[in-house]
Image (cartoon, rainbow, N blue to C red):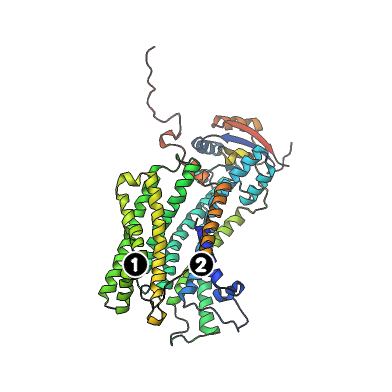
Amino acid sequence: MTIFAVICAASFPLVHMGRLWLGFYWALPLPNAFGSLWVNFNSPLLWDVFAISTYFTVSLVFWYMGLIPDFATIRDRAIRQGATTRAAIYNALSFGWEGGARTWMRYESVALILAGLSTPLVLSVHTIVSFDFATSVVPGWHTTIFPPYFVSGAIFSGFAMVLTLLLITRKVFKLEDYITICHIELMNIIIIITGSIVGIAYITELFIAWYSGVEYEGYAFYNRIQGPYAWAYWSMMTCNVISPQLFWIKKIRTSIAATFILSIIVNIGMWFERFVIIVISLHRDYLPSSWTMFHPTLYDVGEFILTVGFFFTAFLLFAKFFPVINMFEVKSILKAHSERVTHAETADKGVPVTTDK
Amino acid sequence: MTMNADKHFILGIFNDEDVLMDAVKKVRGSGIRIHEVFTPFPVHGLDEALGYKRTRLPIAAFFFGLAGTALALVMQIWMLGYDWPMIIGGKNFASLPPFIPVTFELTVLLSALGMVATFLIVSDMKPYKKPRQFDVRSTDDKHVMAIDLAVNKGKSKDDLARLLRDAGAEEVNEKNFD
């Protein structure tokens, strides 16, 4: 999901760069014909190039590493069914995996370290994205609360989007025994927590706008609440802050239908958050002469539809050809603890009850 | 009969990872060298039971990370400090704080990619590799213990088969590679 979403996200700056091929030395420190005029490492936009591309690469590698043993399982199943082409394709995908104990030992160590590296990456990528806004001087963007606010917003919307897709996949693929109500409930609890953090961030922004006494900041937030785009602000508030609070009720957070509906509401709310931050802050500048309203062009809408289409195509292809649940991890926890055979003969299991007759 | 090493194997097939763990200890205890054990999922403790040394991949990851840190700092300080210094608000040409994000990212990137590349190289994994399959079921639900006949010259095939069966193997098979 991350992978496909990042590709979608990347398409926006790539389209906006116009002459795409120039983007390489605009964005990356590559020697060029301007006497090697380098990129500006002091710019948060450049940090973002590094943060997002690292995040993408490491996520891709981590995701693919998890699939390798399962590709081998599919390959061997194909071999047993006599499907040679399928076996050859999945063998290439599995990098010729054999599953020896030595390889597994190394594999586990790699997986552990990749997980350890990915965790700070999640924090760093959203922090650095928020720097793009926070280091500017635009009222509504210039706030120090942005990094933690973006990180919790990302977890919040990420969990909601995963739930939306997962609930459908679970139903279609009949995965009810693997993804239980307990998992869904725990995810909903994360949504309450992060949704509340996001809510506190919204309120803190308002408080600081008033408390700081900066008139531009104060106006930016007054404009959010009361201005021409108040509908977007209040949609965001309702979807992101109020609706997840329904998950405090156990009946709602253990209900599939309610979770599905609320997860979509959160997705909509997070879309509005971006709209609020970007459009509302930009449509009122320091100079009243540049005040305007935002009207998306046909191309803006087209690009948005393109990303939605690309995302779902990629997701469906993934679900069709790749294992949606990691098979080897499920196998390793299949045995219930009591079933473990530890020195079967010597273990004290008590004497079986024998009844007369 | 003379045998070349790495060609002729006797395979013990196990259904249960706990039985397998006991069998590994038993087989090694009777002085037999196990070629390798193939399992469908990581069996914890199997590497110690087989006497494998802990992997040094984390150390490799650390040094790749260090290389990333060094590369990032040298690149940024050289590019902005020496090769093409730019006056931006009269600030230092090469001041460290704004270089931290890129340094962090390159550290993580090189560490992750370097470690995975090392893993693929030492495990001899590549897309066009033809795997040496002892038993195709070993990626599904069977654990396969392979014993090289040529390495364990003291024991006959029958001895090994009996030992494996006693240790709890469901099946004992023979596998020859040419």
Residues packed near mark 1 inside 10 Å, few (<14), some (14 to 19) or many (20 plus): some
- Please tell me which of labels 1 and 2 falls first in the chain: 1
Q: Which mark is residue B62?
A: none
Residue displayed at 54% across by 38% down: B24
As displayed, is residue A83 above or below residue A139? above
Chain of the residue on which disc 2 is drawn:
A
Q: Which residue is mark 2?
A: A300
- Residue A285 appears in the picture as rendered: yes
Q: Nearer the viewer, residue A353 or A297?
A: A297
Q: Secondary structure at mark 1?
A: helix
Chain of the residue on which disc 1 is drawn:
A
Q: Which mark is residue A230?
A: 1
As displayed, is residue A272 above or below residue A188? below
> Would residue A39 appear left or right of A160 to someone viewing this image?
right
As displayed, is residue B129 above or below residue A137? above
Q: Secondary structure at mark 2?
A: helix
> Would residue A220 appear left or right of B23 to someone viewing this image?
left
Q: Nearer the viewer, residue A33 or A69?
A: A33
Report x, y in % for residue B139.
Answer: 58, 42
> Would residue B138 appear left or right of A162 to someone viewing this image?
right
Report x, y in % for residue A31.
Answer: 60, 78
Is there CB contact under 8 Å for labels 1 and 2? no
What amino acid type should be assigned to the residue bearing mark 2? Asp
What amino acid type should be assigned to the residue bearing mark 1? Ala
Q: Residue furthest left?
A: A211
Residue displayed at 52% across by 37% down: B20
Residues packed near mark 2 inside 10 Å, few (<14), some (14 to 19) or many (20 plus): few
Q: Residue furthest top?
A: A357
Residue displayed at 64% across by 30% down: B158
Q: Nearer the viewer, residue A172 or B143?
A: A172
Q: Which quarter of the rendering shows the C terminus of chain A?
A: top left
Query: Which of the 4 image quarters holds residue A198?
Result: bottom left
